[in-house]
Amino acid sequence: ETGVTQTPRHLVMGMTNKKSLKCEQHLGHNAMYWYKQSAKKPLELMFVYSLEERVENNSVPSRFSPECPNSSHLFLHLHTLQPEDSALYLCASSQESWAHREVETQYFGPGTRLLVL
Amino acid sequence: QKEVEQDPGPLSVPEGAIVSLNCTYSNSAFQYFMWYRQYSRKGPELLMYTYSSGNKEDGRFTAQVDKSSKYISLFIRDSQPSDSATYLCAIGPGAQKLVFGQGTRLTINP
């Protein structure tokens, strides 16, 4: 496997279900991200982990719970979701650099398309 | 006012045309300017980036940043049907704090 992988690619769940999305990066990066992409809306940053510590949480509802057990894996635990949570959930990773002129390119996975019924 | 504004299109042009895609932003502190391309059912992939200001060229693609106008552009020369995708601008004060535009859906007609 290369790059950033996400499983499952598609998920249908009811509002009372609990499910988890998984992301794995094979790039040796030290930062990982969860984004939400809804139709006709910009990508919304949900969570950022740097060196396995959460550094950003953009006021995401508590029904979304991230977990970063190590620098290569990122999970998004879902419970009691709402239909408006249906979207494409994208994971990304990057190599954080303290050389300000370096660009820490974010590499995206293919996403998990989630439908909440 | 949104931090980053991008016309969602759709934009449809004939093969071989020059395509111009644009975004405006509101925060003068933003220094990272990126363009991503997203094909249907795929994640975004980085096309071009610029740090701070200036122009950058890579093959048929040219990225321009005008910080005085808070305006960035992506030009595609000799457009090909394979360029048909959604193009996202991403701008921010740091590479971990990117604000994405809505994306412009582009179709190149053979």
Image (spheres, rainbow, N blue to C red):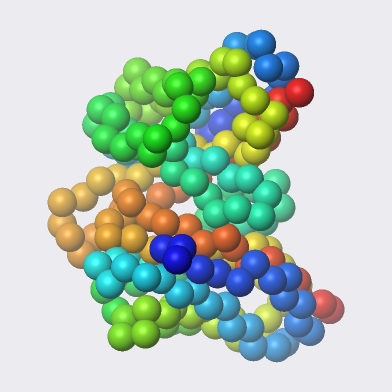
The vertical placement of A15 against A1, above or below, is above
Which residue lies most toward the left here?
A: A99
> Looking at the image, can residue A17 be seen?
yes
Q: Is residue A65 left or right of residue A113?
A: left
In the depicted view, which residue is nearer to us: A69 or B67?
B67
Q: Residue at x 24, y 31 (%)?
A: A51
The vertical placement of B73 against A12, above or below, is below
Q: Residue at x 70, y 88 (%)?
A: B17
Q: Quadrant of the C terminus of chain B?
A: bottom right
Q: Is residue B74 left or right of residue B34?
A: right
Residue B76 in picture, x, y percent from top left: 59, 81
> Looking at the image, can residue B47 be seen?
no
Q: Residue at x 65, y 67 (%)?
A: B8
Dividing the picture into quadrants, the one containing residue A117 is top right
Residue A29 in picture, x, y percent from top left: 33, 39
Q: Quadrant of the N terminus of chain B?
A: bottom left
Residue B57 in picture, x, y percent from top left: 43, 81
Which residue lies most toward the front here?
A: B1
Q: Residue at x 40, y 35 (%)?
A: A59
The vertical placement of A98 against A103, above or below, is above
In the depicted view, which residue is nearer to us: A80 or B10?
A80
